[in-house]
Image: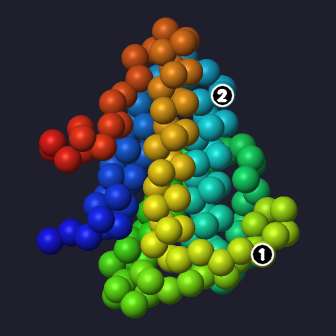
């Protein structure tokens, strides 16, 4: 049986992979804002993963990348989050201290951070879908319910 965090990690991984494939297929027609937003998703996921590991992130929040680099970052982040979501329940309840990009100190639970990361990706994938539609492309359906139907 899957925990909610495992399920959300699986969903996030599935949705990002679908989007990567769609962006590859439509590379010549894809608006640049879509890659900018997807780069942001990947940056945020890496930043949070590195924070959870107590390390300095290798990217900035709005750094822009090629689709290939985004794909590599997705694989790195997704495998790192996989380890985290399968950790024991005590780790999932742990309080994490971190410094944000404005150099402000915060503490949040491990579980809340992961919920934020996965929700953040959903938010920006919806923005990408809107931009695709606005530019005459058919966006992919990355709704959670579509994921659980497969």
- Residue 34 vertical placement versus 69 (above, below): above
Residue 72 rendering spot, x and y as whole percentages: 53, 56
Residue displayed at 50% across by 86% down: 94
* SS class, disc 1: strand
Q: Quadrant of residue 138?
A: top left
Compared across the picture, whether 141 is left or right of 58 comes to: left
- Quick check: 23 above or below 73? above
Q: Left of 49 or right of it: where is 107?
A: right
Residue 76 visible in image: no
Quarter of the image for residue 58 reads bottom right
Q: Is residue 10 left or right of residue 57?
A: left
Q: Counting other residues with Cα less than 10 Å from the Cα at mark 2, is it few (<14), some (14-19), or many (20 or more)?
A: few
Q: 87 or 63, which lies in front? A: 87
Q: Quadrant location of the C terminus?
A: top left
Q: How many marks?
A: 2
Nearest to the observer: residue 69 or residue 110: 110
Q: Which residue is mark 1?
A: 105
Q: Which residue does the image show at 51% across and 41% down from the upper left? A: 123
Q: Position of residue 146 (x, y in %)?
A: 24, 38
Q: In the structure shown, which secondary structural element does the residue marked by tag 2 occupy?
A: helix
Which label belongs to residue 33? 2
Residue 75: x percent and y percent? 46, 60
The residue shown at (53%, 68%) is 113
- Please state if 144 lies on the left or on the right of 76 as rendered: left
Q: Which residue is at a point 56% across and 84% down the rendered structure image?
A: 95
Q: In the rendered image, which quarter contains the N terminus?
A: bottom left
């Amino acid at each position: 049986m899957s925990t909610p965090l495992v399920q959300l990690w699986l969903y996030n991984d599935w949705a990002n992979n679908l989007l990567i494939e769609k962006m590859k297929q439509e590379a010549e027609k894809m608006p640049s804002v879509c890659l900018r937003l997807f780069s942001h998703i990947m940056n945020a996921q890496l930043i949070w993963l590195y924070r959870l590991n107590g390390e300095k992130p290798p990217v900035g929040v709005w750094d822009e990348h090629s689709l290939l680099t985004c794909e590599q970052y997705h694989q790195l982040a997704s495998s790192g989050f996989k380890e985290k979501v399968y950790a024991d329940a005590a780790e999932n309840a742990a309080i994490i201290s971190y410094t944000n990009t404005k150099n402000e100190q915060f503490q949040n639970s491990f579980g809340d951070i992961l919920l934020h990361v996965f929700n953040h990706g959903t938010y920006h994938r919806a923005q990408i879908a809107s931009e695709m539609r606005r530019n005459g492309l058919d966006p992919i359906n990355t709704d959670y319910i579509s994921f659980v139907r497969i």
